Image (cartoon, rainbow, N blue to C red):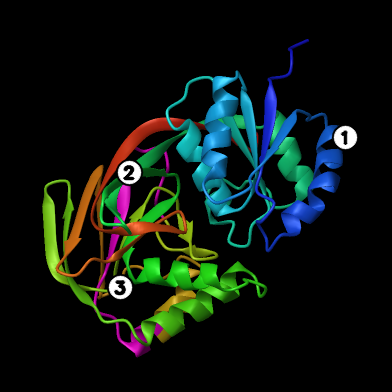
């Protein structure tokens, strides 16, 4: 009989508007009943899970179970990117749950726990972002799902500042219209591999996974283990464009579009005359100029067994 891997739960009590913290005793009991037990480390502040994940891996953890939303996954990934011998499983408890959609990781608690215990391992790529912090200094972070520069960074910021009581999709939907109403496009220069584009754009999306913004399948063909990013350039949209196109994004039916272009490459550089907000997995760590590099097979993720 195989010995169970040393398991550590990394819990964000603040996720899902604090519901995760209130439900944690129940989640822990259900996990134990499902044959999944280990130490639990609860975050106390933003960024804390990165430290906790790194420490758990240093102490010999073989399976980290992230309990929370996309921000939780982002922090944990930044603690273990490129670490050998550590698997990441996810028990989705956030409002957006965009990262897990690409992999079919179940949203239901018992099914998610079974996947954490018995799932297969998929080695996925990560992105490494270099950008300017809000204090104006060079900064670096990994992202597992999607990065962007432009309007979507401002949308994510607005959605994160609301309670998200309506759920991820509604929060991002209304934040999109609120930000769009005041947003002015910038002339953006984008380099993807050897290709360069310069035009007025609303957004540049650098996709490893397929979904962001509370369920928008923004890059339907993105594969997180193919060694390249799908890079979507979103041009100068009108209000009419947004009204007609936004609903289609939830079904992944918005492409091709006359004001969008899809490029592919393993390096992306973005710059604009005025600094644009950068978004990584729904977080907003700083601004352009930004460079994104693909790091192949840098994360071992537990996914539903075939």
Label 3 environment density (alpha carbons within 10 Å; few <14, some 14–19, many ≥20):
few
> Upstream in the sequence, badge 1 or badge 2?
1
Label 2 environment density (alpha carbons within 10 Å; few <14, some 14–19, many ≥20):
some
Q: Quadrant of residue 111?
A: top right
- Secondary structure under tag 2 reads strand
Residue visible at 25% across and 75% down?
258
Q: Is residue 292 above or below residue 89?
A: below
Residue visible at 71% across and 60% down?
18
Comparing labels 1 and 3, the label whose residue is closer to the camera: 1
- Spatial CA span between label 1 and label 3: 49 Å
- In depth, the one of 92 and 42 nearer the eye is 42
Is residue 48 visible to the viewer in this orientation of the structure?
Answer: yes
> Upstream in the sequence, badge 3 or badge 2?
2
- In depth, the one of 260 and 204 nearer the eye is 204
- Secondary structure under tag 1 reads helix
Residue 294 percent across, percent down from the top left? 31, 39
Is residue 306 visible to the viewer in this orientation of the structure?
Answer: no
Residue 140, numbered circle: 2
Q: Which residues are magenta?
A: 221-242
Magenta stretch encompasses residue 227: yes
Left or right, residue 60 beside residue 150: right
Point out the residue furthest to the front here. 135
In the picture, which quadrant includes the C terminus?
Answer: top right
Magenta stretch encompasses residue 94: no
Comparing labels 1 and 2, the label whose residue is closer to the camera: 2
The residue that label 1 is drawn on is 33
> Upstream in the sequence, badge 1 or badge 3?
1
- CB under 8 Å between discs 3 and 2: no
Q: Is residue 180 above or below residue 26?
A: below
Residue visible at 85% across and 41% down?
30
The residue that label 3 is drawn on is 257
Q: How many marks?
A: 3
């Amino acid at each position: 009989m195989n010995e169970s891997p040393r398991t550590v739960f990394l819990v964000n009590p603040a996720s899902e508007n604090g519901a995760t913290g209130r439900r944690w005793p129940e989640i822990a009991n259900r996990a134990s009943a499902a044959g999944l037990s280990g130490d639990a480390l609860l975050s106390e502040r933003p960024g804390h899970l990165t430290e906790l994940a790194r420490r758990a891996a240093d102490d010999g953890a073989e399976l980290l179970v992230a309990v929370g939303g996309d921000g939780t996954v982002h922090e944990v990934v930044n603690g273990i990117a490129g670490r050998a011998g550590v698997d990441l499983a996810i028990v989705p408890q956030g409002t957006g749950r965009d990262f897990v959609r690409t992999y079919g990781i179940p949203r239901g608690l018992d099914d998610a726990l079974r996947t954490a215990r018995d799932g297969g391992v998929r080695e996925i790529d990560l992105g490494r972002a270099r950008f300017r912090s809000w204090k104006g200094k060079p900064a670096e972070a990994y992202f597992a799902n999607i990065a962007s520069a432009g309007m979507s960074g401002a949308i994510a910021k607005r959605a994160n500042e609301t309670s998200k009581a309506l759920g991820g999709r509604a929060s991002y939907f209304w934040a999109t219209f609120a930000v769009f109403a005041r947003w002015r496009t910038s002339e953006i220069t984008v380099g993807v591999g050897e290709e360069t584009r310069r035009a007025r754009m609303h957004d540049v999306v650098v996709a490893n996974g397929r979904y962001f913004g509370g369920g928008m399948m923004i890059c339907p063909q993105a594969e997180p283990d193919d060694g390249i990013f799908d890079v979507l350039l979103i041009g100068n949209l009108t209000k009419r464009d947004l009204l007609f196109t936004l609903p289609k994004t939830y079904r992944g039916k918005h492409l091709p579009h006359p004001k969008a272009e899809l490029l592919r490459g393993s390096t992306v550089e973005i710059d604009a005359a005025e600094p644009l907000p950068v978004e990584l997995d729904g977080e907003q760590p700083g601004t352009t100029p930004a460079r994104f590099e693909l790091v192949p097979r840098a994360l071992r993720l537990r996914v539903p067994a075939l």
